[in-house]
Amino acid sequence: MSKLEVLSPLPGTFYRRPSPEDPPFKSDGDAVAVGDVVGLVEVMKNFQEVVAEVAGSDIAFKVDDGEAIMAGQVIAELDA
Amino acid sequence: MKLASVFIANRGEIAVRINRACRKLGLRVVQAASAADMDSLAARLADAVVEIGAPPAAKSYLDIAAVVEAARRSACDAVHPGYGFLAENADFADAVVAAGMAFIGPDGDAIRLLGDKVEARRVAQTAGVPVVPGSDGRIADLAEAAAVAEEIGYPVMIKAAAGGGGRGIRIAHDAQEFARFFPQASNEAQASFGDGGLYVEKVIERARHVEVQILGDGERFVHCFERECSLQRRRQKVWEEAPAYELDPDVRQALCDSAVALAAEVHYRGAGTVEYLYDAISRAFYFIEVNTRIQVEHPVTEMVTGIDLVETMIRIAGGEPLAVTQDTVELHGHAIECRINAEDPTRNFMPGPGTISALEVPDDPEIRFDTLLYDGYTIPPFYDSLLGKLIVHGSDRADCLARLRRALKRFRIEGVPTTLALHRALADDPDVIAGNVDTRFLEPWIEQHFAQPKPQQEV
């Protein structure tokens, strides 16, 4: 089964939840539809949503909550 | 303790600023840097750099254990926290002292006391500083609350005692509205916060933000006059001035004296700022809070008083008595600071990190530019968007504005979006020139001037 990738559009700090008290947008193993929010990137204290441009199942995150990322970096993989 | 070395536990332009003060005092400088800041201007200017953690601030500049350990291992005598990050964290101040170093700022207990809004209000009242008129704590009974509202004068705010961030607030313009809103607000507070407790506070309709710079060594206290910081966007100051405009001498005296009284009340040690709301109509000022750190906008005060605030706070932390006396603190002319951020005002202030491809700062003895920039620097995405502060001094406000307009025209930063265009437009705006602004001025003004691309003007 081929893998699809969710990429970060921006450099910054990646977050998997809307706020520290909230559950994550997606957990490993969840299905993802096009347009689903999978995380946030904080760029200079400004939060931008990371939206899935592909649909798939069994999401596997490659970046931890609160980790630094670069633009174009793979945030998660999906099964097609 | 005579200081020989300082650990700078911050980044960006303020780290560069602290470095400059340390150089003036002949101190060795060790700079804390996250992995993303090893190439920063502050790191380049330091005698030594210690990498304290990963780029996200939570893993570096906000990590108390990592910062204290780095400072201790670098054998520094003192830690300067700058502003933001851990600057007003009482536990950090305590940890620095527990590790055998001086904290450049007030002690942990003072930070704790003044950081608590209710406690700070109580201290202010004890010192005779006017606070926003309101009920003395929570108030349960409608009749009692209505009497308080009548006494302080409508309009009043009904606030949930357990609320925050603007939630659970209602504004009543008269007694009828008050009688209707009070029970509603109580029920809503009970439903939202599990606590129906309310308090009542006067609404200041056209408030300006005015703040007084204070210095203290624990025994001697002075003010360095006030700053005007009414131009704000999303509660962030954008443009600051010293002194405040059109403040009558008697009001200025009372305002500044009240800040000194507050400093004396808590035996303040270091540089601090007492913030007020100022009602230009009634000429009344009301205490808001105390900031126990050096502030972003401190340079405007330095420009009009000639006092080096960062140097002074380092000297105080080293145990020197405050050298400046109140009668020697004088106002000379006027100063304005523009915060230049890596944000695009035409795209809702979207920030843009990137690499500086051109940097031209006008050369003028009346201009100061406090910055983290150098030509070719790549601005990391992990921290705030402040690129630098353009500070201009003039013989009076009109002269200062004229110099500012010239400076902004010749200023050039390329490679990232900047807010220079915002400042150019503000410097030309009739209301800004007239000082006809309050804290609610800037946001609608931006909507009008920047939210939509301007249609072509027909002549």
Image (spheres, coloured by chain):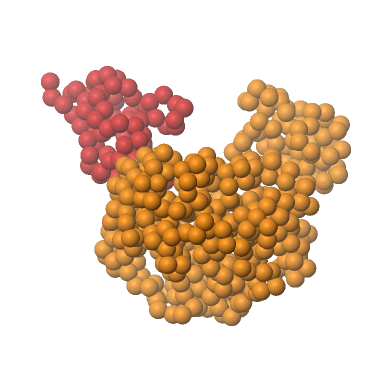
Q: Residue furthest left?
A: A1
Against B209, residue A13 (above or below) is above
**Image position of B343 (left or right of B211):** left
Residue plotted at (51% across, 50% down): B103
Q: Residue furthest front?
A: B1
Against A58, residue B402 (above or below) is below
Name the spot of residue B250 as percent of width and height, x first: 78, 68
Name the spot of residue B9 as percent of width and height, x first: 42, 50
Against B287, residue B250 (above or below) is below
The image quarter in which residue B12 lies? bottom left
Question: Between residues B144 and B263, which one lies in front from this camera angle?
Answer: B263
Residue plotted at (83% across, 30% down): B142
Colour in which chain A is shown? red
Question: Between residues A8 and B218, which one lies in front from this camera angle?
Answer: B218
Q: Which chain is orange?
A: B
The image quarter in which residue B321 lies? bottom right
Residue plotted at (72% across, 46% down): B123
Name the spot of residue B240 as percent of width and height, x first: 56, 63
Against B266, residue B256 (above or below) is below
**Can residue B51 be seen at all in this image of the molecule?**
yes
